[in-house]
Every structure is written in structure tokens, then in C-alpha cells.
Amino acid sequence: MKTFYFTATGNSLYVAERIGGELYSIPQMLKEGKSEFIDEAIGFVFPCYAFGLPRIVIDFIQKSNFKAQYFFAIMTYGNMSASGLRHMEKVGREAGIQFDYTNEILMIDNYLPLFAIEDQLKKENSKKIEEKLGQIVGDIKVKQKKLIRKGIVSSVFSEPIHKLATKFQYDNGDKWFLVQDKCNSCKICEKVCPINNIKVGREPEFLHKCEGCYACIHHCPQNAIHLKFERSKARFINRNVNLKGIIDANNQTKSYVEIYGKER
Ligand SMILES: Cc1cc2nc3c(=O)[nH]c(=O)nc-3n(C[C@H](O)[C@H](O)[C@H](O)COP(=O)(O)O)c2cc1C
């Protein structure tokens, strides 16, 4: 089984690790130009972005060929996924993938313009993450066939909202990022960026091809990168992963340990 994942703050990485199989980072596959994949089972684990897919996940699926007897897609989300998985089914269908199993899992919401991380962490227990994850892992083990279905209203509003929201999110979205003087040029932001949108000199320079994932903001050890409009100064990394895991996933250069000589 091959499990492809995209992650900014570790939720999707943790879910992919629990599902298992051979894990492949989507940004790495794109960087390495790998695009032919065959296995008995192939799956995708990714965050919901504005009721749909992150652009990098769409890119990867459109540029690649997949052959498998069993396809699954798992969407992690923070509050409301609406018909995000329908979007995955559509993108998959256009690339010749017929999904056998889709599911979603409610986790901590890392979308700083709308949600405060402190509040999200208080709600963590009520999200019943381990219970749902156990169910998903079990389903995939027995190659369960089931597709998530939402009501017609959800299907109708998801697509236009995704189109509109991602217009502001991508590329020039980084013009809303503010860097404070406490930045010490450590380059962690450069290393966690999945699409090499950051070059650090004295401080980070954003190159306006932003994916809007906020990995740079959440993982800054100095908490020096902020959004012009953000609900909290607190930052998030899934407790089951560490910064090295995110760097390895998004940009295999020097790890946090190599730079700092210790785990985060
Ligand atoms: C740009 C962006 C858009 C998001 N849109 C949604 C959304 O529409 N619905 C939702 O429930 N969560 C949304 N989220 C929250 C993430 O889907 C959620 O926190 C996810 O588990 C993060 O996964 P990761 O830790 O693997 O990056 C969004 C997050 C970002 C950064």
C-alpha cells in the first residue's frame, strides 16, 4: 500500500502514519518529478482547505498516474469540511481514479484567521480524534468500501466558496505575513515551506507563490511570523509529530536537530 500525504502542522502526517503503508510526501514527489505509481492499494491524506483540496494536492493528482485495485482518501479538517471529499472525488475522476473509500477526521483547526489555537486545544477531547482514527484505520485494513455523502446544500455551496477563498489564499496571500524583529534568521520557515516560497537573508522574504498552509507561521521557533489578521498568537503542531517530521515531509534539507542539536 502507498499512502501519499500533505501536511503543514502534522495532523495529516499523523493520520498517514497511523494508516501506514509506504508513506510518500506529496511536495517531495512533485519536487522529484515522480509521477508513476502502482500498488494494490493507494491512498491520499490531506487537510481540507476552504471546503476543498489544497492546490498542491490537486497539482499532484493531475500530474501523476496511479494504478491500484483500491483507492482511498482521508481529509483532516478543523471545523467544517462541507463537501471537500466530493472535490477529491471529482479531481480523482478526472485523473482516472475511482475512489472506493473516503472519510474525514475532525482535528485541531490551524486556520489562524478564524480560529484561536488555545480554544481549539480546549476542544481537543470533544473531537474524539483517536476514536475516529481507529475506525478509519480498521476500515482501510479490511478494504472497506464507503464514500462520504453530504446534503445537496453542502455540495452546492462548497465549490464556489473554495474557488473564491483560494483566490485570496494562494500566491500573493503571503503579503499578509508580518515578520517581527525577533526573527533570528534560523531558516526553519524556509525548510518547512512545501513549495520553496521563502528565502531567508536577514529575515524571510516571501516570493508570492504561497500555498497558504501557514507552516512557516506555525513552526517559527521565535513566533516571529504573524498574519495581519489572526485570532491567536499561539501556534500548533500535532503532538504526535515533531518539527523534523514536517521538514522531512516538506523540504528535506537540514533538520531542526542538525541545526539546534536537540529535538524541539
Ligand atoms: C488555508 C486553510 C484553509 C482551511 N480550510 C478549512 C475548512 O474549510 N474547513 C475546516 O474544517 N478546516 C479548514 N482548515 C483547517 C485544516 O484543514 C485542519 O487544521 C487540518 O487538519 C490541518 O492539517 P495539517 O496539520 O496536516 O496541515 C483550513 C486550514 C488552512 C491552513
Image (cartoon, rainbow, N blue to C red):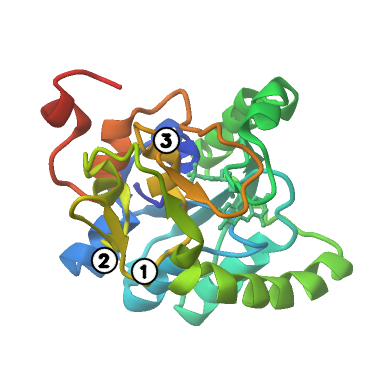
- Give the residue at x 20% y 18%: 262
Q: Which residue is mark 2?
A: 30
Where residue 49 sits, quadrant-wise, is bottom right
Q: Secondary structure at mark 3?
A: loop
Q: How busy is the neighbourhood of tag 1: few (under 14 within 10 Å), some, or many (20 plus)? A: some
Indicate the secondary structure of the residue bearing disc 2: helix
Quadrant of res 121:
top right
Which-is-in-front pick, marks 3 and 1? 3
Name the residue rendered at 44%, 64% in the picture: 174
Where does the image place residue 127, in percent across and percent down from the top left?
71, 29
Q: Amino acid at mark 3?
A: Asn
Q: Which residue is painted at 34% across and 36% down in the image?
A: 182
Which amino acid type is shown beneath numbered disc 2? Leu
Q: Which numbered tag is attached to residue 169?
A: none
Is ligand 1 less than 8 Å from the beta carbon at label 2? no
Q: Which residue is mark 3?
A: 223
Pick the front one: 112 or 133: 112
Q: Bin the neighbour count of mark 3 within 10 Å (Cα to Cα): few under 14, some 14-19, many 20 and up.
A: some
Q: Percent position (x, y) of residue 70?
A: 47, 56
Q: Is mark 1 within 8 Å of ligand 1?
A: no
What amino acid is labelled 1 in the image?
A: Phe
Q: Nearer the viewer, residue 123 or 221?
A: 221
Please report contact status of discs 2 and 1: CB closer than 8 Å, yes or no.
Answer: yes
